[in-house]
Image: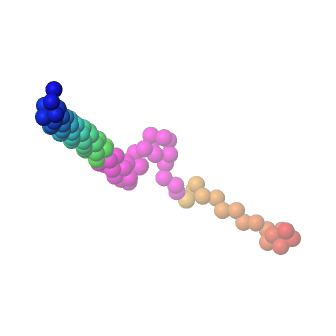
Amino acid sequence: MDRDDRSNIFRYTTVVLVVIVFVIMYVWQNIEVMRMKMSYRETRSQEIELIKKNDRLRYEISKLNRLDAIREYAGRKGLRPVNEKDITILKLDEKREQKQ
C-alpha cells in the first residue's frame, strides 16, 4: 500500500465515523425529546387529576359548611340547639374571692 491509499482509507474512515457519530447523536436527541414529551404528558395528566380532586374537595367543603348540613349532622349525633334552660350561671361569693 502506498501513501495515497492510506490517506484515502483514513479519510473515508474519518468521514464514516463522523457520519456515524452524527446519526447516533440525532437518534439520541430524538429519544430524549420523546422521553420529555412522555414525561410532560404524564405530569399534565397528574395535574388534571389533582385539579379535579381539588374541585371535588372544595365542593364537599362548601356543601358541609352550609348551616342546614351542620344542623342535620348535629341532629344525627344527638345534639340540639342551646336554649336558656341549658345555661347555668354561677355566682361566687365576693368575700371568698377577695381572700384568695
The reply, left or right, for residue 29 in relation to residue 62 is: left
Indicate yes or no whether the magenta region holds residue 81: yes
Residue drawn at (64%, 58%) of the image: 88
Q: Position of residue 98 (x, y in %)?
A: 83, 73
- Height in image: 34 above or below 82? above
| Quadrant housing residue 18 | top left
Residue drawn at (52%, 57%) of the image: 83
Dominant secondary structure (helix, strand or loop) of the stretch shown in magenta: helix
The reply, left or right, for residue 74 in relation to residue 25 is: right
Residue drawn at (52%, 55%) of the image: 82
Q: Position of residue 48 (x, y in %)?
A: 25, 44
Q: Quadrant of the C terminus?
A: bottom right
Depth check: 26 or 87 in front?
A: 26
- Height in image: 45 above or below 65? above
- Res. 68 in view: no
Residue drawn at (50%, 41%) of the image: 78
Question: Residue placed farthest to the top in the image?
Answer: 1
Q: How is this picture coloured?
A: rainbow
Question: Residue placed farthest to the right in the image?
Answer: 99
Depth check: 35 or 57 in front?
A: 35
Q: Quadrant of the N terminus?
A: top left
Indicate yes or no whether the magenta region holds residue 65: yes
Question: Residue placed farthest to the front in the image?
Answer: 2
Depth check: 99 or 51 in front?
A: 51
Q: How many marks?
A: 0
- Res. 96 in view: yes
Q: Position of residue 43 (x, y in %)?
A: 28, 42
The reply, left or right, for residue 4 in relation to residue 85 is: left
User: Where does the magenta region start and end?
Assistant: 54-83
Q: Position of residue 92 (x, y in %)?
A: 76, 66
